[in-house]
Amino acid sequence: MNNSGCDCCSDKSEKLLPLADALEKITSSLTATQATEVTPLRQSLGRILADNIHSPIDIPPHRNSAMDGYALCSGEITEHNQKLQLIGTSWAGKPWQGKAKPGQCIRIFTGAVVPACFDTVVMQEKVEREGETISFPFPTLADKNIRLPGEDIRKDEQLLEIGRQLTPADLGTIASMGISEVRIKQKLRVAFFSTGDELRSIGELLNEGDIYDSNRYSLYGMLKRLNIELLDMGVIPDERRAVEAAFLAAAKNADAIITSGGVSVGEADFVTETLEKLGQVNLWKIAMKPGKPLAYGTIQETAFFGLPGNPVSAMVTFYQVVRPALLKMMGAGDKKTLRLKLPCNQTIKRAPGRIEFQRGVLKQSDDGELCVTPLTGQGSHILSSMSKADCFIIIPAECAEIAAGEVVVVEPFDSII
């Protein structure tokens, strides 16, 4: 694992694959899981739908009042007749069952059934009441303040489609249809581990040259947000046999393997070497910063992603490459990541050649306008920059300088994290 902040690999001596091309090659080689299961609705939050959802009923199922007020026939209120007799009440869940004669109205509450003999509802604040006599100060139109059957959802209408990752609002919508269970894609199983003799787990003492392993915790958090079943295999030492044994165990028990460290060109970097020995390897040096070295391939039909060891590089490559690939494997539908165009309030100078993901902070002025500020300390070893930031500033490969006030593309963390 290389924790230096420098870019130790020269871009001039090797041809780098553009990020978009690398992502296309990876995702096009993957297929979505076909395994499904039926689960209670409350347990489906964040899971991927395996069936389209059609409503078995109209929602709302009946005409109902949009507010508290009085239900009546609109034609009975004229300039010459503005008073009606109150003869009953329709409550939500307890409809009025009587029959109305001309000159009569009923009290009605929000959500209550509007009887077929009435065609409008007048809100309670617009009437005057004296005993059982209700005065309506002006004429009203038909169909006012009435929710019609199927106004929200029509019977047999498709509301949600295969591949949707279910949200809290989705759960409520499905519940409104009276559906208690849904068919979802089974969770992916992802094994992950770090490599490096210098790495120590939390709770161990650090000797000179040692560092605590942070990448497994970042990976855990990023994977957990995707609702994936996790297999944490810990820290694997930089030994061929240990790395090979970890690869075989992970391939046996997981749909995908993610490692961090060991994909560079050092004498003790065995990840790519072992991947080539045990499976099929496509090693791309991607034209992105941070995160150029990335190993991708398969071991016994298990997808493999070897991330760089530098902690920011590991996170950036996960979000920009691994996350879209895992979503494809999960069976999630196409969903573009939110990207905004905002002014950058500081000058950025850099060496062109690779698309760059700088960490930034969104700021909002008093008048509501958004802008972005790049953080100081953009080294790939400065993990705290990922905690301090709330977005990526995406700088095109050919760009050498962004002037203060110039518009840049920004990817808010809320859209990916």
Image (cartoon, grey):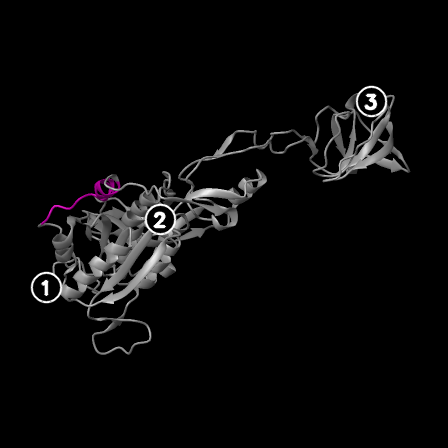
**Circles 3 and 1: CB distance less than 8 Å?**
no
**In-image side of 295 versus 107 (left or right):** left
Reading the image, the residue beneath label 2 is 344
Instruction: Provide residue 154's location: percent of width, then percent of height.
Output: 56, 29
Q: Secondary structure at mark 2?
A: loop
Residue in the picture at 36% in, 40% down: 336
C-alpha separation, residue under disc 2 versus residue under disc 1: 42 Å
Position of residue 257 in the picture relative to residue 85 (left or right): left
Q: Within the magenta stretch, is there residue 23? A: yes
Residue 169 horizontal/vertical position (percent) = 52, 44
Q: Is residue 158 left or right of residue 214?
A: right
Residue identified by numbered label 1: 267
- Residue 234 drawn above or below residue 47: below
Observer-side mark, 3 or 1, equals 1
Mark toward the start of the polypeptide (3 vs 1):
3
- Name the residue that disc number 3 marks: 76
Amino acid under label 1?
Glu
- For the record, the magenta segment spans 14-27
Give above or below for 111 relative to 301: above
